[in-house]
Image (cartoon, rainbow, N blue to C red):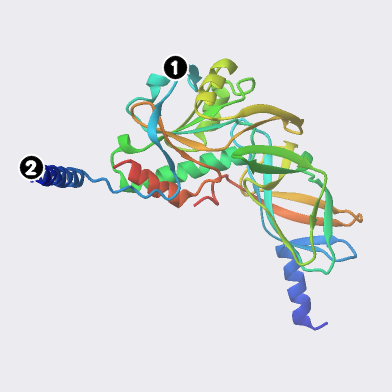
Amino acid sequence: MGSSRKIVAVTLAALALSVAAVLAFRSVDHTPRQFLYATVLPEPMVLPEFRLNDQDGQPLTRDSFRDRRTLLFFGFTHCPDICPATLQQLAVVRRKLALELPDEQDLPDILLISVDPERDTPQVLREYAGHFGDGVTAASGELGELTKLAAALGIYFEKGDVSGNGYNVNHSAAVLMINRAAEFQAVFSAPIDIDAMFADLMLLSE
Amino acid sequence: MNRQAVMLLLAMLVITACSRHDGPALDVSNVRVLAPLPGRSASVAYMDMHNRSQHPLTIDGISSPEFVRAEIHETTLSDGIARMQALESITVDAGARLSFAPAGLHIMLLDPRKGLLPGATVRLELRYSDGGLLIVDAPVRTRGDDVK
């Protein structure tokens, strides 16, 4: 009898714990958010230390990403096709977000990091980025620093063949989202889906 | 040929393209040249092609009086990496459509002979592999106009 009482007591205790656990779980909203397009990292990744130059020649470091959300794209200004198309699309996404998020602080910055520092000087970058409208800027820097940041983010780039346009740079075409804590939080693979990206960024801004 | 058919034919020639070509021709629509970005001289042209004929049609050369050089390029996305390569020619199969569009096929227009502003017109001369010409007048647009 003693042993069966013990079993009952243990069973009851286990049951009580389970109920408590369920109640505790329910008190927090654990419903997984449904992203249409973004691949969201289970644990955001802290950016490595790096030092680039923005389009005004000022240092761009990990700390530059704090307190703002950033949509980051690696490309180059001589890229005639996919780079301007992507920046154009990101600018449209930002304009759509602006209709829903009245506080400018909630809108993502759009940053082109040029993987062609040989040709993309700050002046070239400033002139180029200005074409795409509010919130779009560009940066670049020494190859070693670019490689350090790109490698940490899983971004590939490599100087390609000489063509009629000088030379090409082959590069990953994904767009990365960096959160306000300067962490890599989500990636949007190419080609860009404007509506799905807008919906996911609304979710990520909650 | 009745008058209506002649008018229709003339309209089609004016709206799309004209062809100095004895054989079957490609229908070309949605043609546009995107003005160069600030600080850049290269432009890009996009269009849709439709081969209504019974035979494959090959374009193996492009030129434009407004540019020193024009080339067919293709951006490909493989494993998320964008690469660009020049193509010697493109072939549109019988009955098939082919789009020159962002992040895919495009015509690179290099070294403009004069400044190119939105609203201008650029003449594109596409050469068929048998020597005929497909001449397309393309309006110059601002980049981003077709991104919604």
- The x and y percentages for residue A86 are 54, 41
Q: Name the kind of residue labelled 1 in the image.
A: Glu
Q: Is residue B107 above or below residue B48?
A: above
Residue behind mark 2: A2
- Mark 2 vs mark 1: which is more N-terminal? 2
Q: Is residue B96 above or below residue A24?
A: below
- The x and y percentages for residue B67 are 76, 40
Rendered image: mark on residue A205: none
- The nearer-to-camera label among 2 and 1 is 2
Q: Residue furthest bottom?
A: B2
- SS state under label 2: helix
Q: Work out whether residue A142 can be spotted.
A: no
Q: Name the kind of residue labelled 2 in the image.
A: Gly
Q: Tell me which chain the residue with mark 1 is part of.
A: A
**Rounded to the nearest whole Å, what is the CA distance between mark 2 and mark 1?**
64 Å
Residue behind mark 1: A49
